[in-house]
DNA sequence: TACAATGATGAAAACGTTACCCAACCAATC
DNA sequence: GATTGGTTGGGTAACGTTTTCATCATTGTA
């Protein structure tokens, strides 16, 4: 019941192992009838090359690591799936690891991927200011594609433009008469959160709406994201709430329900990265959306490009976000 | 800039490569001072063993394949993440592939994983009646853990009990006075869909509610899942709708909105596997829920158990589903 | 004291593949 | 007819581990 090797194939086909290897790797170099004989032998033996042996020779594993804080987040899962698809088409396998938002686990995962000798790593990190993490990435000797993060490392980048759509959203709310805005995020020190905050604040100031309210909730105990009362009641409660991600959109909706506030009559809301669940609410929730499939595919393409030539200049792809208008925002008469 | 090998470590530590190998793999067998010297050398060289070389000797890759029709589905992603976590703790890496609901791609993926020499495969398949797929699984010579599928192959199983909670749901609706029920699914020939259909029909018959309405929509063109008009209007329209998965729950909600039907006043609805998004709706949607983290972890545990001993008897784990009552069902007066 | 048993380490071979170099053959060219 | 050059194929070594067996030193026992 042993697996057949290149030697078995060679023996059956009456050639040397070298020729078999050539048939597998550079079919042009071997005469057509010989090749046929070899292919025939391969089929009859159910041969498939031993990648471990191959990569020991070539120092290539044809595998890419994908590291994310949370694979079960729909956005990350969508990116992972798209990346996997694109990589698979190029003959690469994807190893997935998740860190549960713990930088030290990301360091450990990088070490693991190093041990695995992956040819490259695509990653989301959960904290841009973790020095050990930055060192671990910098010390990694394979190509890196960084997803939507701002890190002082040499890597190709896939970024989203968070600012433009966020600015639009703020101006849209301002145009509806909203004066008090709140942005509700997880307290992560990562590019999307930071950019959104910045854009939110700036656009609000430009529209004469400052100060805005910035709420940041812990990322990790994902359960029980309860928002404080003064976000909903009292004279200073914001009339428009922008929530980042499905869990926080849910927290906002639960708060609104609890205080018996109706959307969009009493409050306007906008979701960010809430994808297809934006249409579960009544009315459907206006949201800022990105195409995660494109993000994942772009990451894979950057990686493949880099694997093709290490000396290429660094490249960054910036992908747009879009505001999708639905029915969750309305004119307000609060002053 | 070459990576250091076991020989480099051996040279620095003044021992033979064998001893280094022993320090790495069976630390007990080597004297404490020697071990210290070796560990020191490993650290100073930044040594990590070459897994390709190791697996060429041992025929073990310490990697597990995870195959799913759709990684971006939140339920599958949650299972994948939990499995990965549990596998990682045991020193295994997880390779992820998705088939996009195409059995032929699942066959190809199995072949790929075979080439990769994974030590085991955890998989969801997208069609229980695809003969080629069954053959491919049966022909795979590594341990298989099958997730919630009914296939004539030798494998350990992680199943969900779909029937009990579905029966409860039907009786609950019957108790509220509903006489006409509909179950809306994707048209997949897989255990969860089949079991749910069976349980739905049986429980309805037992409650004197037959016939029920069974709607099956194509799984693959995921966009534009539009439900036909007669599901919502007309004398025979069901008063209660049970929808499987987030996309179909969304389709139901959109239909209800379109025909200006309110939940729960005009229609009662129940979601299945809609997880945390059930609480995005107003009122929150009553749903049948499973713990996908437990599913993923169980799959990993079954796999690790099997890898520990191939001769163990096959095991199946059956995990419960639960109905979570919220506000989307109400007494009906329709007759 | 001699001998067996135990423990710690090393030498050599093997895993399956590819890189490198060379040989044989044939055709084309001078 | 000798030389050159291209095509096709093979022999050998090497990749970095672990396995197997042997060696040596040390301890315990009769």
Image (cartoon, coloured by chain):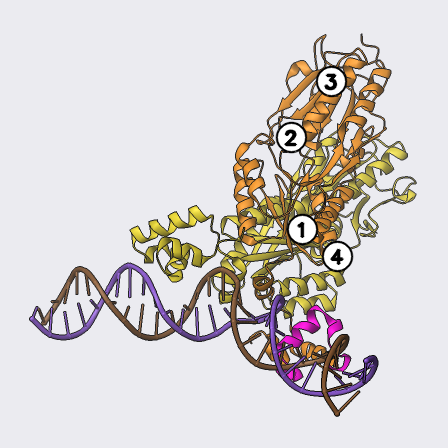
Chain colours: A orange, B yellow, C purple, D brown
What mark, if any, has residue B163 been given in the picture? Answer: 1
Q: Please state the horizontal and vertical placement of residue A268, each as a whole percent of the image.
A: 79, 20
Badge 2: residue crowd in 10 Å (few <14, some 14–19, many ≥20) = some
Residue A176, compared with residue B281, is above or below; it is above
Have a look at marks 3 and 1 and say if they share a chain: no
Which quadrant: the C terminus of chain B?
A: top right
Q: Residue at x 83, y 41 (%)?
A: B251
What mark, if any, has residue A43 been given in the picture? Answer: none
Residue B94, compared with residue A20, is above or below; it is above
Q: Which segment did they paint magenta?
A: A11-34
Chain bearing mark 3: A
Residue A129: which quarter of the image?
top right
**Element marked by disc 4:** helix
Residue B147: which quarter of the image?
bottom right
Question: Which sits in the foreground, B330 or B50?
Answer: B50
Check disc 2 and report the residue beneath it: A190
- Viewer can see residue B121: yes
Have a look at marks 1 and 4 and say if they share a chain: no
Q: Please state the horizontal and vertical placement of residue B120, each as a whole percent of the image.
A: 57, 61
What mark, if any, has residue A89 been given in the picture? Answer: 4
- Residue B61 appears left or right of B133: left
Question: Which sits in the foreground, B151 or A299?
Answer: A299
Question: Which sits in the foreground, B213 or D24?
Answer: D24
Contact (CB < 8 A) between labels 1 and 4?
A: no
Of marks 2 and 4, which one's residue comes earlier in the chain?
Answer: 4
Check disc 3 and report the residue beneath it: A201
């Amino acid at each position: 019941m042993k697996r057949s090797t290149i030697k078995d194939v060679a023996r059956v086909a009456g050639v040397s192992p070298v020729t078999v290897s050539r048939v597998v790797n550079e079919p042009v170099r071997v005469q057509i009838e010989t090749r046929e004989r070899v292919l025939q032998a391969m089929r009859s033996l159910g041969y498939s090359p031993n990648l471990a042996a191959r990569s020991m020779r070539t120092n290539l594993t044809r595998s890419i690591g994908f590291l994310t804080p949370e694979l079960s987040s729909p956005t990350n899962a969508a990116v992972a799936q798209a990346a996997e698809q694109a990589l698979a088409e190029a003959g690469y396998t994807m190893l997935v690891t998740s860190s549960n938002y713990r930088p030290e686990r990301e360091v450990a995962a990088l070490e693991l991927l190093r041990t695995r000798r992956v040819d490259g790593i695509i990653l989301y990190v959960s904290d841009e200011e973790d020095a050990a993490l930055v060192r671990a990435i910098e010390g990694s000797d394979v190509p890196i594609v960084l997803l939507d993060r701002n890190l002082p490392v040499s890597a190709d980048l896939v970024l989203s433009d968070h600012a433009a759509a966020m600015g639009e959203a703020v101006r849209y709310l301002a145009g509806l008469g909203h004066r008090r805005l709140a942005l509700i995020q997880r307290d992560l020190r990562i590019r999307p959160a930071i950019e959104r905050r910045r854009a939110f604040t700036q656009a609000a100031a430009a529209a004469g709406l400052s100060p805005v309210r910035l709420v940041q909730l812990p990322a990790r105990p994902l359960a029980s994201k309860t928002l404080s009362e003064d976000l909903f009641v009292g004279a200073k409660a914001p009339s428009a709430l922008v929530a980042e991600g499905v869990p926080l959109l849910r927290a906002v909706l639960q708060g609104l329900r609890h205080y018996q506030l109706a959307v969009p009559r009493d409050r306007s809301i906008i979701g960010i990265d809430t994808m297809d669940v934006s249409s579960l609410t009544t009315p459907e929730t206006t949201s800022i959306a990105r195409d995660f499939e494109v993000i994942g595919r772009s990451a894979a393409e950057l990686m493949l490009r880099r694997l093709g030539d290490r000396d290429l200049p660094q490249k960054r792809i910036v992908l747009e976000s879009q505001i999708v208008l639905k029915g969750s925002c309305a004119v307000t008469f609060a002053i």
